[in-house]
Image (cartoon, rainbow, N blue to C red):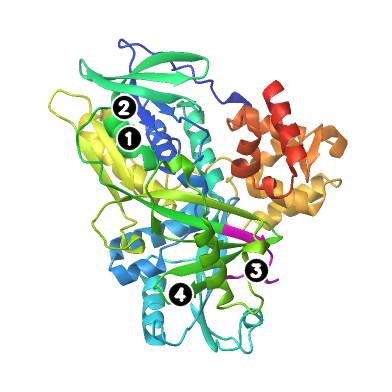
């Protein structure tokens, strides 16, 4: 279905005589994943997000689809196995925004011994049903080009596979697919009250221009770091929230090395950091793990965290990484389930779903924890938990094979798609074509078709961003402000200056 036919959120304001099957609070990866799965099973779904889609935790990850190698140390074998199985499944349904990466793990004398790393990587290769991704191999850093950026005291490394994901785009594409299947998606709409009345949920929601209400047979609280606030302040449920907020910060610096592989570095404090090629001209370094107290909306990378990441990277790279070289930082709060772990990095990344369904009352499902890699399985588990109370939830799962918008091409077909696009549109430069196809996949043609040159794309806002793309994002992907376009739908904020960002925002406000 073309994006122009995405339905307007007409379900806003439904009454008790026409309740929707499912209301979802939270437009992050879990909320959008649940909404998509439910809509695909025939449920009538309404989703509310108080800000933009993926405006918090779901756009502030390390952007990896991975099993979590270090979780093996904490014996989280089920979580790791499930995550490893999801890598290739997600790659198959979204090959434009997900693709394989090779990770280089240098052996560090005095930290984890080589035999333990080999054992962990053996398990990593074999417990998750790996089919397409290449296996682990041992590297001689003196001979392999990946050793060149590193200090000479590293002799051996292990190279293994995981995948990259454009995290915020994964959220948006789930929301798009949910809308295509009939869901009503309301961004910048905050649920201020949710009460049980006559066997239904009665929700009051506020958007800038109006306050209205809907009725729903079931309610999902997928508010991420605000899941506890929704329970106590919106639903007025006295159950323990069970949330442990853990801050993870990242820094972006000019590109440190030329090859396309990533590094995973061990630190003396037991934590690890990644160094990943990012947006062609940069290197992404992260993450930190520290308990966070306060409003998740206020989270930001602290000077201590920036210094920590710079120092950790400088332990390995020949060229020092300094706070002065940082061009951008971002920070998110992971809403982990509070399992009583003594350290933030030891708290479980597994998800916990709690169901509150007193006899004769509408059910409430709350989502705690989770990671972006397992969002699809989390959605399946959430709907399975609702199934005794919702007939539609008993219908067969389907998302394992359902391509996300723009992902309807083979996992190994990106270069062929790029070559075909460049043949059809000879005026289009390869870097711009690559970015657009990585963002939109086969749907990039909705932006490009009919154009015979850049002038046909409308107003130029900077870098390779043009009016036709902005209008597409506003029409099809709920973009309303410049930050939606520059930091979530894309990362072009790294390339536009302040005046260009202001001009884009003014254009979008006037459109």
Please tell me how crowded label 3 is: few (under 14), some (14-19), or many (20+) other residues with Cα within 10 Å: few
Disc 4 and disc 1 in contact, CB within 8 angstroms: no
Disc 4 and disc 2 in contact, CB within 8 angstroms: no
Residue 483: x percent and y percent?
Answer: 62, 38
Quadrant containing the N terminus is top right
The numbered mark at residue 260 is: 3
Judge whether residue 458 is colored magenta. Answer: no
Q: Secondary structure at mark 3?
A: loop
Note whether residue 392 is visible: no
Mark 1–mark 2 Cα distance, whole angstroms, equals 7 Å
Q: Nearer the viewer, mark 3 or mark 2?
A: 2
Mark 4–mark 1 Cα distance, whole angstroms, equals 35 Å
Residue 484: x percent and y percent?
Answer: 61, 37
Name the residue tied to disc 2: 234
Q: Residue at x 85, y 39 (%)?
A: 454
For marks 3 and 2, the one nearer the N-term is 2
Name the residue tied to disc 4: 267
Quadrant containing the C terminus is top right
Q: Which residues are magenta?
A: 251-262
Judge whether residue 255 is colored magenta. Answer: yes
Q: Nearer the viewer, residue 113 or 414?
A: 113
Q: Please indicate whether residue 438 sits to the left or right of residue 117 in the image.
A: right
Q: Secondary structure at mark 2?
A: helix
For marks 4 and 1, the one nearer the N-term is 1
Q: Please indicate whether residue 49 sits to the left or right of residue 43 in the image.
A: right
Disc 3 and disc 1 in contact, CB within 8 angstroms: no
Disc 1 and disc 2 in contact, CB within 8 angstroms: yes
């Amino acid at each position: 279905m073309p994006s122009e036919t995405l339905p307007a959120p007409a379900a806003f304001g439904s009454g008790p005589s026409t309740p929707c099957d499912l209301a979802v609070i939270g437009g992050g990866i879990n909320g959008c994943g649940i909404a998509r799965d439910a809509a695909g099973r025939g449920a009538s779904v309404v989703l509310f997000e108080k800000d933009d889609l993926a405006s918090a935790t779901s756009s502030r990850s390390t952007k990896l689809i991975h099993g979590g190698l270090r979780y093996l140390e904490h014996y989280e074998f089920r979580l790791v196995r499930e995550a490893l199985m999801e890598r290739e499944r997600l790659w198959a349904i979204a090959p434009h925004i997900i693709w394989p990466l090779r990770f280089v793990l240098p052996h560090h004398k005095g930290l984890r011994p080589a035999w333990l790393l080999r054992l962990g990587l053996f398990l990593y290769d074999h417990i998750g049903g790996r089919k397409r991704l290449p296996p682990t191999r041992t590297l001689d850093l003196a001979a392999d080009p990946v050793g060149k950026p590193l200090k000479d005291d590293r002799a051996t490394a292990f190279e293994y596979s995981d995948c990259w994901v454009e995290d915020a785009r994964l959220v948006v594409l789930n929301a798009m697919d949910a809308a295509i299947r009939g869901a009503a998606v309301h961004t910048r709409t905050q649920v201020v009250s949710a009460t049980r009345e006559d066997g239904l949920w009665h929700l009051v929601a506020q958007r800038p221009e109006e306050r209205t209400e809907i009725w729903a047979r079931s309610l999902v609280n997928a508010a991420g770091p605000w899941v506890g606030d929704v329970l106590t302040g919106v639903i007025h449920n006295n159950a323990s929230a069970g949330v442990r907020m853990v801050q993870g910060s990242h820094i972006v610096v000019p590109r440190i090395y030329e090859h396309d592989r990533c590094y995973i570095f061990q630190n003396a404090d037991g934590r690890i950091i990644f160094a990943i090629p990012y947006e062609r001209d940069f290197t992404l370094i992260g993450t930190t793990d520290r308990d966070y107290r306060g409003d998740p909306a206020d989270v930001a990378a602290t000077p201590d965290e920036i210094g920590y990441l710079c120092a950790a990277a400088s332990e390995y790279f020949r060229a020092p990484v300094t706070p002065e070289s940082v061009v951008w930082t971002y920070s998110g709060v992971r809403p982990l389930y509070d399992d009583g772990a003594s350290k933030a990095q030891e708290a479980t990344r597994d998800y916990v779903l709690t169901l509150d369904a007193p006899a004769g009352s509408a059910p409430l499902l709350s989502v705690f924890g989770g990671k972006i890699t397992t969002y699809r399985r989390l959605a399946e588990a959430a709907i399975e938990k609702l199934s005794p109370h919702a007939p539609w939830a008993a219908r067969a799962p389907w998302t394992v094979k359902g391509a996300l918008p723009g992902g309807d091409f083979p996992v190994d077909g990106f270069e062929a798609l790029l070559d075909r696009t460049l043949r059809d549109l000879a005026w289009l430069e390869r870097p711009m074509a690559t970015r657009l196809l990585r963002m939109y996949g086969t749907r990039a043609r909705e932006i490009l078709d009919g154009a015979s040159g850049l002038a046909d794309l409308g107003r130029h806002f900077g870098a390779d961003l043009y009016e036709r793309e902005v209008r597409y994002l506003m029409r099809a992907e709920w973009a309303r402000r410049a930050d939606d376009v520059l930091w979530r739908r894309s990362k072009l904020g790294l390339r536009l200056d302040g005046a260009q960002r202001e001009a884009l925002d003014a254009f979008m406000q006037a459109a």
